[in-house]
Image (cartoon, rainbow, N blue to C red):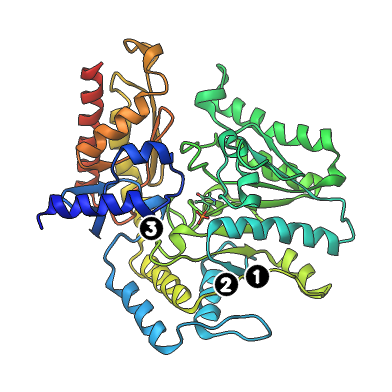
Amino acid sequence: MTDKQTTAAWQDADHRSYLHPFTDYKQLQQASSRIITRADGIYLWDSDGNRLLDGMAGLWCVNVGYGRQELADAARDQMNELPYYNSFFQTAHPPAIELTELLAEISPSGMQRTFLTNSGSEANDTVIRMVRRYWDLMGQPERKVIISRERAYHGSTIGAASLCGMPDMHTQGGLPIPDIVHIEAPYHYANGNGRSREDFGRHAAQALQAKIEELGADRIAAFIGEPVQGAGGVIIPPDTYWPEVQRICKKFGILLVVDEVICGFGRLGHWFGTDYYGLEPDLMPIAKGLSSGYLPIAGVMVHERVADVLIERGGEFFHGFTYSGHPAACAVAAANIRILRDEQIVEQVADELGPYFRARWNELGSHPLVAEARSIGLMGALELINEDAEGVDEKRGAVGTACREACMSNGLVMRAVYDTMIVSPPLIITHSEIDELIEKASLSLDRIAQES
Ligand SMILES: *Cc1c(COP(=O)(O)O)cnc(C)c1O
């Protein structure tokens, strides 16, 4: 069979059998999936042999890039030694113990313990249960409310989707569950209303205090936020935002949950977004870059001041998963952390790649279609479209998809959140590969500018 015939066969079978995540099924029946068959470094290949630069590192997760033999070896060796065992009923195994030790070593001070899960969604459901368990043990069971933010993404299970600030998700299935509320996001471009970034950062943080006072501090269990909101559109908060949020959490004695699922493991040029912003979280959900996506694994890192309560006050925490701390996934995650550490990948993002990426990304800001270019570490966003661009009104809401398609046909995976383009490439991208990413993005912008 030719590549084209093979591709058509995959696409037919895909239409017949596979219900995809986050997909309009009717639309997909009329279109065809691109079938990805292999990957190396920062590149993907499809079943027709086309090469794509993966500007999204899969789904923000392939931090060390594709094709790392050490990770494949770690999985194979562990599967030969002990493919599965659980950590229920007072048992454990070396890979889970080693991984949690390693996490404690690299994490901000005091995040000594980790509860392991299989996905970021499960990690955030664990957050909900653990936070409420904590307040029960503290003798304040009425503290149940968790404050999240608009445009937040925390996962897709019922609990995690409730934490999300995505109205579309909440229209399906009667979400959010009770006692989860949302405040404004620190999204200066969309909500700044002429305020300076600094001023707006303080203003957005004040929304937390206002919500606490509205509901009564004695009902609030926790605040949850991503250091930089990822799926919401790479929303980089003003520098004034997080210090104020931290202060408010402390003032009212509510737990601070920092969702590190995207920002963790080097994305911002630090091990965690928490380090970048100097935060003191009580709980930290982690996933994605934890294993660079090679196997599914996630967790919640827990500060000593919370863990001590869970431990000393006793009683069983009725929560866990069959695959919590899966040996092969733990072995791969530990090997992945060692690669990040031993190859000083996090430092390179801070010192070399981040600054270079920012300089080049900012150049796209002068394209006539681009209203704002922003970046932090190795993630970036472009706001389309400039209010001065021709035919702005008809293009609103369509230009993002058009740009994403143009990028695809130019061999670049870039994602669109409405009309915001976002990238988050593997952390092992080189300077010349950054140049290639920028060139392809720029060509794609030119193409959609011409088409209009
Ligand atoms: C992806 C993501 C999640 C959910 O992780 P899954 O593994 O997809 O369940 C949670 N929080 C953030 C910030 C994420 O980006």
Q: Nearer the viewer, residue 1 or 162?
A: 1
Q: Residue at the spot x=54%, y=57% of the render?
A: 120
Q: On residue 324, which mark appears?
A: 2
Residue 41 in view in this figure:
no
Tell me: residue 146, above or below residue 318.
above
Can you identify the residue that label 3 sits on? Answer: 347
Q: On residue 399, which mark appears?
A: none
Can you identify the residue that label 1 sits on? Answer: 320
Q: Nearer the viewer, residue 125 or 63?
A: 125
Callouts 1 and 3 close, C-beta under 8 Å: no
Q: Nearer the viewer, residue 393 or 197?
A: 393
Callout 3: CB less than 8 Å from ligand 1: no
Give the x, y percent position of residue 16. Answer: 35, 51
Label count reads: 3
Q: Residue furthest left?
A: 2
Snapshot quadrant of residue 338: bottom left
The type of residue carrying mark 2 is: Ser
Snapshot quadrant of residue 364: top left
Distance of mark 1 from mark 2, alpha carbons? 7 Å
The type of residue carrying mark 3 is: Glu
